[in-house]
Image (tube, rainbow, N blue to C red):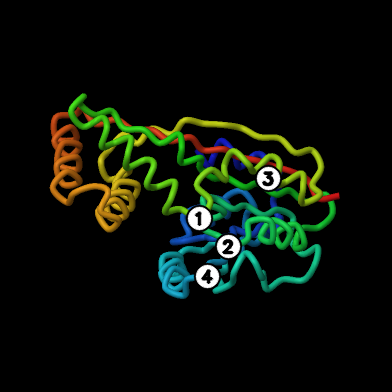
């Protein structure tokens, strides 16, 4: 889906773009192709381990990429420094989403573009048998408790307007979780939380996961989640 939303950044050769919450750096590598050798991609992440791994992954690539340990709540850049900022599936975990949007807006030049992508976890769903349906719905509800801002995706449009951006727009995509491994982070978080709270027995949690693994083996596994991309322009 990233390639679908990259045009919202309005990147040109020579542009300076920030990838907020870069993780292992895959998005930064994709954006480097768009800004070309005269451009610059800065990937920032609060995790030193992630930054180290991202740096090593591009060591032998001739790409205009730099990775730094930095927080989207306090970006180590001057005001009006970047042509664009991209932030994907980070806001849901932050203690202060409004503060992060203000900070990302601060480092944008006037006319610069901000694109923020995140999930509404209330949309998460897995196709399961009738005997496991109640457990699957319960696990979705536990994720809503565990993730600090589980519905942030549906709030992005309003939050970007509140941050003072112009030309605010949004796009929605249903992202298939077509393999068990794509759905596993959701399941792992939900099962762990439900068992820890005593609301789901370890046996029932294990049975649900086993059922979905069996669906994977027979080609019947299916799940999906909604991703919302909100974009805006700095005045």
Find residue 9 and name its label. Answer: 3
Q: Is residue 146 above or below residue 135?
A: below
17 vs 159, nearest the viewer: 159
Mark closer to the chain start, 4 or 1: 4
Disc 1: which residue: 148
The circle on residue 95 is 2
Q: Position of residue 13 (x, y in %)?
A: 69, 51
* Mark before the other along the chain sequence, 2 or 1: 2
Q: Which residue corresponds to mark 4? A: 46
Mark 1, other Cα within 10 Å: few <14 / some 14–19 / many ≥20: some
Report the Cα–Cα distance between label 2 and label 1. Answer: 7 Å
168 or 94, nearer to the observer: 94
Residue mark closest to the camera, 2 vs 4 = 2
Q: 10 Å neighbourhood of mark 2: few (<14), some, or many (≥20)?
A: few
Q: Say which element carries label 3.
A: helix
* Marks 2 and 3, the one that precedes in the sequence: 3
| Cβ atoms at labels 2 and 1 below 8 Å apart | yes
Q: CA distance from mark 4 to mark 3?
A: 23 Å
- Mark nearer the N terminus (4 vs 3): 3
Q: Is residue 122 above or below residue 234?
A: above
Q: Are marks 4 and 1 in contact (CB under 8 Å)?
A: no
């Amino acid at each position: 889906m990233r390639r679908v939303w990259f045009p919202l950044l309005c990147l040109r050769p020579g542009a300076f773009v920030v990838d907020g919450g870069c993780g292992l750096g895959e998005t930064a590598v994709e954006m480097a192709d768009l800004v070309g050798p005269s451009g610059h991609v800065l990937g920032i992440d609060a995790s030193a381990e992630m930054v180290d791994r991202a740096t090593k992954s591009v060591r032998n690539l001739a790409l205009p990429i730099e990775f730094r340990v930095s927080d989207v709540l306090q970006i180590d850049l001057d005001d009006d420094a970047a042509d664009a900022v991209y932030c994907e599936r980070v806001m849901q975990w932050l203690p202060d989403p409004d503060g992060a949007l203000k900070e990302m807006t601060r480092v944008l030049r006037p006319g610069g573009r901000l694109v923020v992508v995140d999930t509404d976890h209330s949309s998460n769903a897995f196709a399961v048998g009738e005997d496991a349906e109640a457990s699957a719905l319960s696990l979705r509800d536990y994720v809503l408790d565990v993730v600090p801002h589980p519905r942030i995706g549906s709030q992005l449009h309003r939050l970007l307007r509140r941050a003072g951006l112009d030309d605010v727009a949004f796009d929605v995509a249903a992202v298939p979780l077509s393999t068990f491994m794509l759905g596993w982070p959701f399941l792992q978080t939900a099962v762990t939380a439900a068992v820890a709270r005593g609301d789901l027995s370890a046996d029932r949690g294990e049975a649900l996961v086993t059922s979905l693994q069996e669906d994977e083996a027979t080609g019947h596994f299916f799940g999906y989640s909604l991703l919302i991309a909100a974009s805006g322009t700095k005045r």
